[in-house]
Structure formats: structure tokens, C-alpha cells
Image (tube, grey):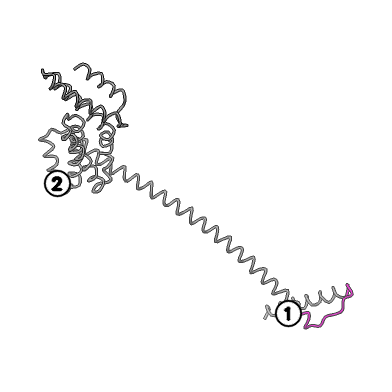
Amino acid sequence: MNVVLLILIIIFIILLCNYLYRRIKGMPDKSLKETWSDLKLEWCKYKQESKEDWDKYKQKCKKIDEKYRQKTQTINEEFAKKKEQKDLVKIEDSYKEIYEEYKNFSIDERGKFLHNLLLNDQDEYVEVLRFIQIAEESVDIALKSKNKDVAESRRKLALEMEQKIQERHPKAYGLIAGIIQFLKDNYDVSLFENQCIKYYEDAKKLKTIKSRQKRIDCINDLIKEAEINPKIDKKIIDFWKNKVKEI
């Protein structure tokens, strides 16, 4: 009841103010119907303006909310990434610790160590250790062998171990990455020099000129191949060019 009375009072005041304003300005009086129409028109304008302001406010809030959600998502993604990296480091460290322990054992002790891991359902660690051991031994032979076929087969075996670790145990890849990269960086040079050493030593032992010349020709062929290989330094090639002259 009080609310209705208040509304009637407000309407009366508005009408009175309108009447007095028009009297002061000397404007002709409007009928109550016209005045009511004006009031309704003003009210509609007010509602429209309020709606537009409200829509603008909602759009602004929406943009702020979207920006906040994007920022929150970015923070969560960065946090998850850091956590994943941290977890990966922990896992890599566990592989590394076991591998370092394994390397310090004698051959007999290594067998017992692997057996104990199997008994404790640590098959994954056993497989990783085997792959890394095979890779290291293969790299060592590939870089030292004077026999090209042996060196090449060992190189392929090392790369196979790398692929198996990448596929089956990617979190342990850091343990093998360095030795594989060392193989890739040095294989061409080592193979070239090892073969040159082989033919050079053979030539020095042989007594007939014809037999020695065959070895010299083999070294020269290797030199020609090395000259078009970007991984082999020119100084190494020049060294063997001069060495051939000593035979």
C-alpha cells in the first residue's frame, strides 16, 4: 500500500513540475493523456538506454572473464608443463642412478644385479640397462674397428637400440642420447682413419711393389671419398695424403 501511494505521489510531483514549467515558459497546457504519453516515451528511452548500458557492462564483464580464464588456463598449462618436466627429471635420475650402479659392478655382479631387478618386477629397468649396454659396446666397436662391415653393423645396432629406447622407454632416452650423438659426430672420420691405418700397416708389411700398390690404391680411394664428405676435416685428409707417400 505504501509503495502504491509513493508511486502516485511521484507521478503527481512530475505532473505538477511539468505544469509549472509550461506555465513559466508560456507553453500551452498539455492534456493528461499527452503528458502520460510523454512520460511513457521518456520511460521507454530510459529503459532502452539502461539496456544498452547493461549490455555494454555484460560485454565488458565477458571480456574480463574471458581474459581471466585464458590467463588461468595459461598458468595451469605452464604449471602442468613444469610438473611434467620435474617428474621427467626424477624418472631420468632414477634410471641414471641404477645405470651408474650397474656400471660399477663386475661382469658376475651385473648378472646378479639384473636377476634381482627381475625378481622385484623391475623388467623395465633391466631392458633399459641392456639396451644402453649394447649401444655403448656397439659404439665403441664401430669407432675402433678397422673392418668396414663390422663397423657398419655395429653402428646400425647402436641406432636400433636408440630407436627401441625412444619407442619403449622415452623417459630414459637421456642416458643414451649422448653416446649416440658421439657416434654420429665421429663415425665417418673414425671409419676413414681406421681403414687407412689398416691398409697402411698392411702395405708396410708387404715386400712386393704390386701388393703394396694395391693397398696404396685402396687408401687413395678412401681419400677421394673423404674429400666429398663434409664431416671429414681437410687436415685429416692431407695427413693421409702425406702418409701414402711414405709407403
Residue 164 is situated, as x and y percent measured from the top left of the image, at 22, 46
The label number, if any, that marks residue 230 in the structure image: none
In what quadrant of the picture does the C terminus appear?
A: top left
Residue 209, placed above or below residue 121: above
Mark 2, residue position: 118
Displayed quadrant of residue 62: bottom right
Q: Which residues are magenta?
A: 23-35
Residue 169: percent from left, percent from top = 24, 46
Circle 1 is placed at which residue position?
Answer: 8
Q: Is 221 part of what is drawn in magenta?
A: no
Q: Is residue 33 magenta?
A: yes
Q: Report the front residue among 29 and 245.
A: 245
Label 1 sits on what residue type?
Leu
Query: Mark 2: which amino acid?
Result: Leu
Q: Residues within 10 Å of mark 1 (few under 14, many from 20)?
A: few
Answer whether labels 1 and 2 touch (C-beta < 8 Å).
no
Q: Position of residue 40 (x, y in %)?
A: 72, 77
Above or below residue 156? Residue 9 is: below
